[in-house]
Image (cartoon, helix red, strand yellow):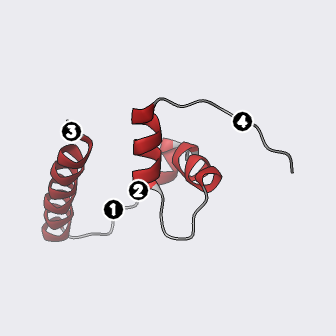
Amino acid sequence: MGTKTISLSEEAYRLLKEAKLPGESFSDVVKRMIKKRPLSSFAGLWAELEDEKIEEIKKLIKIEREISDKKWGY
């Protein structure tokens, strides 16, 4: 497999470096971050969950979004 040299702004490099997991290369990060799943693949996943569990998941998602927003400066 060949390689390509690209230019990134300092900010883009910092964000990419922060997203990097232990043992991951920058190529791994880019591939992980741009993979897309069709939205339809998520349809019905919560159908069997009780309302209480769904509310718990929603609260956790809200907390994670707030943490992410602070990390990325939004």
Q: Quick one: label 3, few (<14), some, or many (20+) residues within 10 Å? A: few
Which numbered mark, 1 or 4, is in the foreground of this view? 4
Q: Position of residue 4 (x, y in %)?
A: 76, 37
Q: Which mark is residue 3?
A: none
Q: Residue 72 in the image: x percent, y percent?
A: 26, 42
**Looking at the picture, which amino acid does disc 3 mark?**
Gly
Residue 52: x percent and y percent? Answer: 12, 69
Q: Secondary structure at mark 3?
A: loop
Residue pointed to by mark 1:
47
Separation of residues labelled 3 and 4 (CA atoms): 28 Å
Confirm or deny contact between disc 1 and disc 2 (CB under 8 A). Answer: yes
Q: Nearer the viewer, residue 34 or 20?
A: 20
Q: Dot 4 corresponds to which residue?
A: 5
> Closer to the N terminus: mark 3 or mark 4?
4
Q: List the residue tagged with mark 3.
A: 73
Mark nearer the viewer, 4 or 2: 4
Residue 44 is marked as 2
Rounded to the nearest angstrom, the CA distance separating label 1 from label 2 is 5 Å
